[in-house]
Each structure stands twice: as structure tokens, then as C-alpha cells.
Image (cartoon, rainbow, N blue to C red):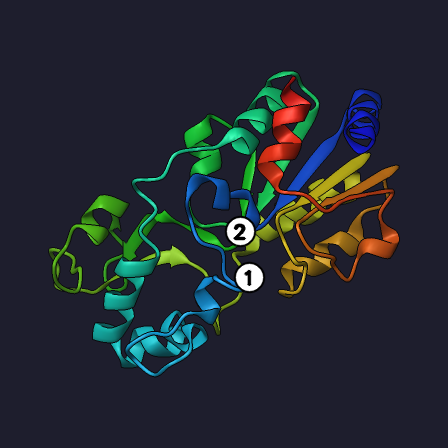
Amino acid sequence: MKDIDRLKEMIEESNNIVFFGGAGVSTDSGIPDFRSSDGLYNEKNKYNFPPEYLLSNDCFYNNIDIFYEYYKNKMNCLKYEPNITHKYLKKLEDEGKLKMIVTQNIDGLHSKAGSKNICEIHGTVYKNHCTKCHKEYDAEFVFNNKDIPKCECGGIIKPDVVLYGEMLPEEAYSKAIESIAKADMLIVAGTSLSVYPAAGLVNLFRGKYLVIINKDKTGYDSRANLIINERLSKVFEELSN
């Protein structure tokens, strides 16, 4: 594939690569995305509320029963394993070329693959805290709890994921900004680049190569040096060979 050969050349020439990924990175692991035709936002649910409400700060504090029933049903990522994309990025990090992974995903699969330099700008299901005493709890405690997960102090446990209506975590977002601004190559993959403020991070890139890998077109395609409209597993499988 001509595009893969060009992508390999770009990676070879670059020494400060940042990868910016969305839900499409994890679909090859079996995790549904959000905005495709069969994604989370287009499926019917029994609550007669849109996912934007069911996964919102408002729902957590005002309809906690519904929030946790939906969250535990749809956001449980514990059984999923890293795919070829996660594994290739780990290899690229080991080679010293990939300096940072900026991910919108909350599934923790980059960490599972062994990557170390990760900005989880939407948080992660693997971290949870008590809203009262701030004690931390793991994902297993939350997802395996048959009721609303509560702390031993009686407080309700809240996932450390960015719910609708909440700000992005300042530390992770600042690190993402700094990394992208310094990068000589930015690989954007598996994201429609339609969710802000995360999508706006692309505007900070001043390096040599902007690559967009996504099944569908994005609003940033005109800025890219290389666009590959293909399934990520196919692209990263070929990169690995």
C-alpha cells in the first residue's frame, strides 16, 4: 500500500511523535464506539434518555440508580484486551520515537499494552474515588458491585471519567497541550475530531507531519499531510510488517 510506505517514511524521519486517538482505536478490541451507525449514540435504550444525559454529571448526582445501571452495563472494559494498534504504539514508544499517547478513551487499553507515556484526557474507568472521603477504589470494585458502589465511610464512589457537563482533567490536558505543541509528527487515529475541546488540540500542532487515520472523513483533513481512510487494524498490521 502506497500510503503505508509513505507513513513508514514519515515515522522513520520523525523523533518526537505524538499519537492522538479516539474510540476507533479500541473497536478492534471489541469495544463499541460512540458515533458510528452501530455505536452507542445510535442504539435505543430503555431509559428514554440520550447517552449524553445517562453519562452526565447531572445524571450521576440526580439519578444515581439510572447512572450506575447504564454505566456498569456500557462502560465495563475489564474483559477487553489491547489490539494491534495498542501493541504497535508500545513498540514505537520502546524505540524512543513515540513520546506521548493522548487518548480520549477511558478503557485503559494503552496501559494494558504496556505504554507508559499516556494522557487520558477523558479519565479512566480504572480509577474511582469516594465523593465524601476521597478514598480510591479500583474498577473491579465498581463493576462487580451489584448495587450503587459505596465507600466504607458511606460516601458514593464516583468514576474518574469525564462526564458530560464536567471539565477535562487539568493535569492530563496540560500535558497533552505541551506534548502536541512540541511534536514533529502527530498521528490522529480513530476519531471523528468532532468532540471539543479535545478535537481542538490538533490546532496546536506546528510540526512537520500531520497524519489522519480514520474510516470516515474529518473536518481537519485539509490540514493533513497524509489521510488514510481505512480500518486501524489493517493500517497498523501493515506498519508492523
Residue placed at 53% from the left, 64% from the top?
37
Q: Residues within 10 Å of mark 2 (few under 14, many from 20)?
A: many
Decide which of 132, 114 is in the foreground and name it.
114
Decide which of 46, 174 is in the foreground and name it.
46
Q: Amino acid at mark 2?
A: Ala
Above-or-below relation of 80 to 170: above
Q: Residues within 10 Å of mark 1 (few under 14, many from 20)?
A: some
Q: Amino acid at mark 1?
A: Ser
Q: Mark 1 sits on what residue? A: 36
Decide which of 169, 66 is in the foreground and name it.
66
Circles 1, 2 touching at the beta carbon (< 8 Å)? no
The mark nearer the N terminus, 1 or 2, is: 2
Quarter where residue 183 is shown? top right
Q: Mark 2 sits on what residue? A: 23
Left or right: 64 in relation to 203 = left
Q: CA distance from mark 1 to mark 2?
A: 10 Å
Residue placed at 17% from the left, 50% from the top?
144
- What is the secondary structure assignment of the residue under circle 2? helix
